Image (cartoon, rainbow, N blue to C red):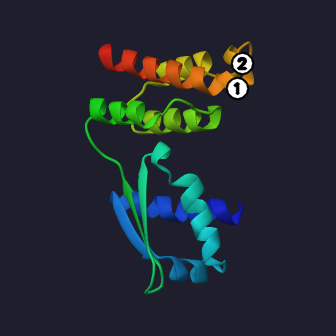
Amino acid sequence: MNLSNIIEAMISDMLEERDEVEFQRNVMAQSLGCVPSQINYVLSSRFTPERGFIVESRRGGGGFIKIARISSDKDTLLMHVVNSVGFTLDERTMQNHVMNLVYKELLSKKDANIILSIAGNNTLRSIPQEYRDNARAAIFKQALLAVIQNQ
């Protein structure tokens, strides 16, 4: 298991116990034998809003990090995702949104597979690359709105 996965697992374990955790970046880095920037990398790549997290970083005093799960009712969370998607959406970010929604049980695996299929690069390959992410964003948002309406 690589260091990024270990850091992610450690933070995820802390989040299993409660929806919000706070820790010192330097203390965690020292306990793992890595540099604090490695912690920053994991936070910025794996604990993102697309995956349902809010990360706050405070400078000074050893660099405290606060991570919280975004929580609310099902329709509100789905609308949050719809509203957070701008006019473009790359495939990787869409996949992260869908994985987070399935994890939070806001989207069934069946609906997730349909959305990933209809808005994936294979389906959109006939659209010129410069317009593909725009089309994906529109399709993704409409699919989530359909899920909300059919609940």
Name the quadrant containing residue 135: top right
Q: Nearer the viewer, residue 146 or 82?
A: 82
Q: Residue at x 49, y 25 (%)?
A: 109
Residue 46 shown left or right of residue 81 in the figure:
right
> What is the secondary structure assignment of the residue under circle 2?
helix
Badge number at residue 130: 1
Q: Which residue is mark 2?
A: 122
Rendered residue at 47%/39% (across/down): 100
Residue in the image at 73% along x and 24% along y: 129
Whether 30 is drawn above or below 56: the answer is below
Amino acid bearing label 1 = Glu
Image quarter in which the N terminus is found: bottom right
Q: Amino acid at mark 2?
A: Asn
Q: Quadrant of the C terminus?
A: top left
Q: Is residue 54 left or right of residue 131?
A: left
Which of the two labelled residues, at mark 2 and mark 1, occupies the earlier sequence position?
2
Whether residue 76 is visible, yes or no, is yes
| Residue 34, x across and y down, in percent | 66, 77
Q: CA distance from mark 2 to mark 1?
A: 15 Å
Rendering coords of residue 28 (x, y %): 53, 77
- Callout 2 environment at 10 Å: few (<14), some (14 to 19), or many (20+)? few
Circle 1 SS class: helix
Q: Is residue 140 above or below residue 14?
A: above
